[in-house]
Structures are given as C-alpha cells and as structure tokens.
C-alpha cells in the first residue's frame, strides 16, 4: 500500500531540526518505501542517513526499537552508535514531517553485489547476514521484514540490515512483512514473532537470489492452498549454488533452527563441506592408502618386536 | 475495538445510503473500512466516490486494489485502524492532561517515545473484532476466491496477535428474498476447520450496501448485549478499547 510521499528534499537543501536545531545538508536520496524516504545527508563533512517519515506514530515506533537495541548493545559489546538524532523538519510549504538520523550504511543490495563479485561470495555473505540476525535474536527480537531491499552488502561480503520498521519483540505479531518472504503466505506458520520467522524469510531470500523468475512464477500461478515449502525446496534443488545448502534450507523452511546463531553454525558446516569437495576419490589415493596401511601394519609389527 | 470491513466492486443501488449507515456504525463505536476490488472492471467515478465517502463517514480508510493485492491490503488496513483507534483514544487522554489538541506532533520527540510505546502495547494486546461484509453481487463472482483467501490471511494475522481477536463474515444481498445480508460465519478465532466460506452462494443483481451495513452494526449491538448478559466478568478482564 504505497502512500507515496508528497515531498522531495533537493540536493543542497539545508534541513534544520525544529526542536534540537541541528543542521544537515541533503546530498541525495538513498531509497524510499511505504513509510518514508531516506536521504544521504552531511553534517560537518560527516555522512549520515536521514529518514523522513510519513506518519509520526509509525516512525516513533521504529525509533523506539532502535533506541531499545542501542541500549542493549551498549550494555553488551558497546556496538557503534546507530541513531544520532530525532527531530521534526518543516518544509517551505509549512508542512511538518518527523525524521531521524542514523549511521549511513555503505553497500549494495545482494543481487548487485553477487553480480559484481561473483556467486562464490554467496556463502560468506549469507553467513554474515545470519550473524546480523543472531545479534537481534540474542536480544529477543526478530527482524520481521527481511527482504532483498533491506540487506546491504559492502566489500568482502560485510552485511548490514537497514529498515528496522519490522523489528518485533518475540511473542508479538510481526509488525511489517512482505508476502513472498512470509511463512504465513506459504502456509508454514503464523505471524507471531520468533527467530524461525526470520530464518524462513532468509531461506526464501536465498531462493530468490538464484531462482527469481521461477519463484515469481510460483507465486503467480499457484493456488493459495497449494502454496507450500515443498515447492520452494524444489526450486532450491534446481540451483547449482543452493544445492549444497538444500538440507539447511529444508530445515529453515520447517522452522527447525532455534535461532540464527544455531543456523549460522549449521551454515558454516556446509561452507566447509563445499571447501573440501567430496569428489570421487581417484584410484591412486586408494592405492596410496593401502600401501601406507600395509606399511603401518608392517611397522607396527616391527615395533611390537617382530616374531621374536 | 470493533471494525467492519466492506469489500465491494460497485455502487449501492437499494435502500438506505451506505454513507448514512457507516456514520451510524461509527457513532456506535464501530470503524468502517472499505476496499474496492477493481480487476479490469471499472468501478466508475460514482462508485469510487461512494467508497471513499463510506470510509470517511465510518471513521476508517478506503483503498482501490486488484485481487492480487487484496490480502495484503486487508491485513494492513486492519492493523492501521487498530493503531489509529487507540491513537485517538490516547490523544483524548493527552488532551485532557496536557491541553492543546493532544496530537503526538505537539509533543517533543523524547516525550513521544513513551506515548507510542503505550499505543503499540495496547494495539497488540487489546481485544479486537472484525466483521467482514462481502459484496456478492454478480460482478464479484470471479473475485470470490481472492476474497476468501484474503479472509483466511486476515485470520492468520489476527491469530498472531497477543490479544483475543475474532472475525465474522457476512455477504450481501442476503440469500432469502428480502434479506439484506446473510451471516456466513459467526464470531470465531480460527478458520482452520472451515472448508469453504461461501459454499453455495447465489450471486444476485442488487447491491443493498447501506441496509447490509446497518444489519452488521445491529449484529454488533446484539452480540455486545449477549456478552453483557453472559460474561460480564470476562469483559472486564479483557478490557475493550474504543
Ligand atoms: N542507514 C542507511 N544507509 C544507507 N541506505 C539506507 C539506510 N536506511 C535505508 N536505506 C535505503 O533506503 C531504502 C528505504 O528505506 P526504508 O526501507 O527504511 O524505508 P521504508 O519506507 O521503511 O521502506 P519499506 O517500504 O521497505 O518498509 C532502503 O531500502 C535502503 O536502500
């Protein structure tokens, strides 16, 4: 339901907060969604991201989540601050909008990253994304609206999540979701927030990365009551890149991981299995093995003191 | 919290004005939302205007969508209405405490945080009832599968809330001659046992939107009275908002 924003902030414009009077210069728009627009801004030559909301209560609810997360992180490992400022801005038209300022996350979306760097980066990027989810799950939150638009990848497959509008404390109903990533849509469970909810979305995201056309065909052509995880899994098995992960994906679709930390460990096991390919063993290794086994037996015999 | 969600694809053509009926429902504390289902067909300027006005009079919102977007729209509207209903109640409180209009925007950002936390908490935990009123006139026939899917999807979202959520379903015009609307499903918290919501629907020509709305509002009143007589303590414990 895109109630698209009726405002635009132009490059070079200077925004002054109504309450705290901090000033930001607009560089360009980074993206827009159902809830507002995000701009790259500058303050004393520091780059930041500024999100302008369409609805004060909605945006505040998102800010509350960010503040709670930050508080938890400070108690823990003192993670870098994410939220810099919260205020309102007034446009020349006289209309006021709420905004908040957060850390600017450099990066591209996963499809572009993989296209540029190669699909061999997929397992690592996936692992890093699972670690990000694990941070949230460790604090009792699900990300909720995990989708391709909300994952940014920087160099070497470093991953950051953006758009915390869907983040939901475990046990409450997911605040915001996107149909194709939603387990309810696939007849695989309700929309109460828990860690497996995100892992389901993660698995759909994997399928989307490599079988996008087929996935859309599936959503367009299948009767709702026939929509199921078996179909998703079938797509995963078709893909060269996903095949090694099909066991992992099956478990994620079935809600079989406790949380993202456990899922990340299991993912890592698959990565290492790919690293050490279990190709058919050539005949000469077997011969070598037999030889050395024979040698070992001989030396054991010798060590044991021979027949004497 | 009480909502009526009207799903239609055209103009009312008999009986009381649906705008009046929606205004009446709103006075009774029931919010009326309206979805117009397009799908190639044209609702027409007049129909579109009526849909907007019904929602306006009913204190709710309206959207025009294709069947593909129906589930997501219904789910979002219901959720947004819950938040708005609570926001209005909270705003009234704030107004009496702080003066001014009580609008969130008037508070400095640090103060909003607490208010919104309360709104979110109530939105998740308070009791919710949604009565769906489905236009079953002839032109809706090809859209009924999507309507049923949207209803099941809504039930799923409601089940995911912490607060008790119930849903009921009506279609109009009613099956018996002269009936404005027929109840397909009484208040329920679960649809998994229901094979088909509209097993043998006869699609007819008239569209008595106003009288049908009135009937659903009446149904709300009756079930509230039943509750008052039956489980007064229940009601107190769960605490209706709005
Ligand atoms: N901190 C950030 N750094 C860089 N880019 C960002 C940042 N936050 C958001 N973006 C970009 O802006 C886009 C829109 O932001 P966001 O998703 O928060 O808006 P939204 O209205 O909540 O969208 P949605 O409809 O997906 O919920 C994102 O997809 C992302 O590309």
Image (tube, coloured by chain):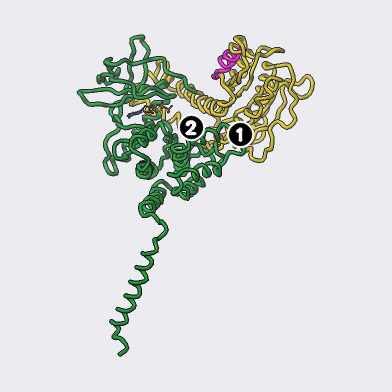
Mark 1 falls within which chain? B
Indicate if the residue with disc 2 has its beta carbon within 8 Å of ligand 1: yes
Name the quadrant where ligand 1 sits. Answer: top left
The magenta span reads: B50-63
What hue does chain A carry in this figure? green
Q: Position of residue B214 (x, y in %)?
A: 67, 19
The answer to whether A38 appears left or right of B230 in the picture is left
Residue at 30%, 23% (x, y): give it: A40
Q: Say above or below: A51 vs A274.
A: above
Name the residue carrying label 1.
Answer: B152
- To which chain does the residue with label 2 belong? A
Depth check, front residue: A216 or A268: A216
Chain displayed in yellow? B
Cα gap from disc 1 to disc 2, whole angstroms: 17 Å
* Label 1 vs label 2, nearer the camera: 2
Local crowd size for mark 1, using a 10 Å CA cut-off: few (<14), some (14–19), many (≥20): some
Q: Which residue lies furthest to the bottom in this view?
A: A308
Residue B58 location, x and y as percent? 58, 17
* Residue picked out by circle 2: A178
């Amino acid at each position: 339901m895109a109630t698209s924003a009726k405002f635009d902030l132009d490059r070079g414009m200077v925004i002054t907060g109504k309450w705290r009077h901090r000033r930001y210069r607009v560089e360009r728009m980074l993206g827009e969604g159902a809830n507002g627009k995000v701009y790259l801004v500058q303050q004393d030559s520091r780059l930041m991201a500024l999100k302008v909301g369409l609805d004060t209560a909605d945006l505040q609810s998102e800010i509350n989540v960010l503040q709670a997360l930050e508080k938890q992180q400070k108690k823990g490992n003192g993670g870098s601050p994410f939220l810099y400022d919260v205020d309102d801005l007034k446009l020349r038209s006289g209309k006021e909008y709420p905004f908040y300022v957060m850390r600017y996350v450099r990066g591209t979306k996963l499809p572009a990253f993989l296209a540029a760097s190669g699909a061999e980066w997929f397992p690592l990027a996936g692992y890093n994304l699972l670690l990000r989810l694990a941070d949230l799950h460790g604090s009792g939150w699900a990300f909720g609206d995990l989708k391709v638009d909300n994952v940014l990848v920087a160099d070497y497959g470093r991953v950051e999540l953006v758009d915390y509008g869907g983040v939901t404390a475990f046990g409450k109903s997911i605040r915001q979701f996107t149909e194709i990533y939603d387990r309810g849509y696939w007849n695989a469970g309700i929309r109460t927030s828990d860690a497996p909810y995100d892992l389901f979305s993660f698995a759909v995201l994997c399928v989307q990365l490599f079988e996008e056309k087929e996935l859309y065909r599936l959503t367009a052509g299948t009767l709702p009551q026939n929509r199921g995880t078996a179909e998703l899994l079938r797509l995963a098995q078709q893909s060269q890149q996903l095949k090694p992960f099909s066991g992992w994906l099956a478990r994620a679709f079935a809600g079989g991981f406790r949380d993202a930390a456990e899922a990340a460990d299991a993912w890592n096991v698959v990565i290492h299995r790919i690293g050490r390919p279990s190709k058919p063993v050539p005949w000469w290794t077997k011969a070598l093995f037999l030889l050395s086994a024979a040698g070992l037996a001989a030396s054991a015999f010798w060590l044991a003191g021979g027949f004497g | 919290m009480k909502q009526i969600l009207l799903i239609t694809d055209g103009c009312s053509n008999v009986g009381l004005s649906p705008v009046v009926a929606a205004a009446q429902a709103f006075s009774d504390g029931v919010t009326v939302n309206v979805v117009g289902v397009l799908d190639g067909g044209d609702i027409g300027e007049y129909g579109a205007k009526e849909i907007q006005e019904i929602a306006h009079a009913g204190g709710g919102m309206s959207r025009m969508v294709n069947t593909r977007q129906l589930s997501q729209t219904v789910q979002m509207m219901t959720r947004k209405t819950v938040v708005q209903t609570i926001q209005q109640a909270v705003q009234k409180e704030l107004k009496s405490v702080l003066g001014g209009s009580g609008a969130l925007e008037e508070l400095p950002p640090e103060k909003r945080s607490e208010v919104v936390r309360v709104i979110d908490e109530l939105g998740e935990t308070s009791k919710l009832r949604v009565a769906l009123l489905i236009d079953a006139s002839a032109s809706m026939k090809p859209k009924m599968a999507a309507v049923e899917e949207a209803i099941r999807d809504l039930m799923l979202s409601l089940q995911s809330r912490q607060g008790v959520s119930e849903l009921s379903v009506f279609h109009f015009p009613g099956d018996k001659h002269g009936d404005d609307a027929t109840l397909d499903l009484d208040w329920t918290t679960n649809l998994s046992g229901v094979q088909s919501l509209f097993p043998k629907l006869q699609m007819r020509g008239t569209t008595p939107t106003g009288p049908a709305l009135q009937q659903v509002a009446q149904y709300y009143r009756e079930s509230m009275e039943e509750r008052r007589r039956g489980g007064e303590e229940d009601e107190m414990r769960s605490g209706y908002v709005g």
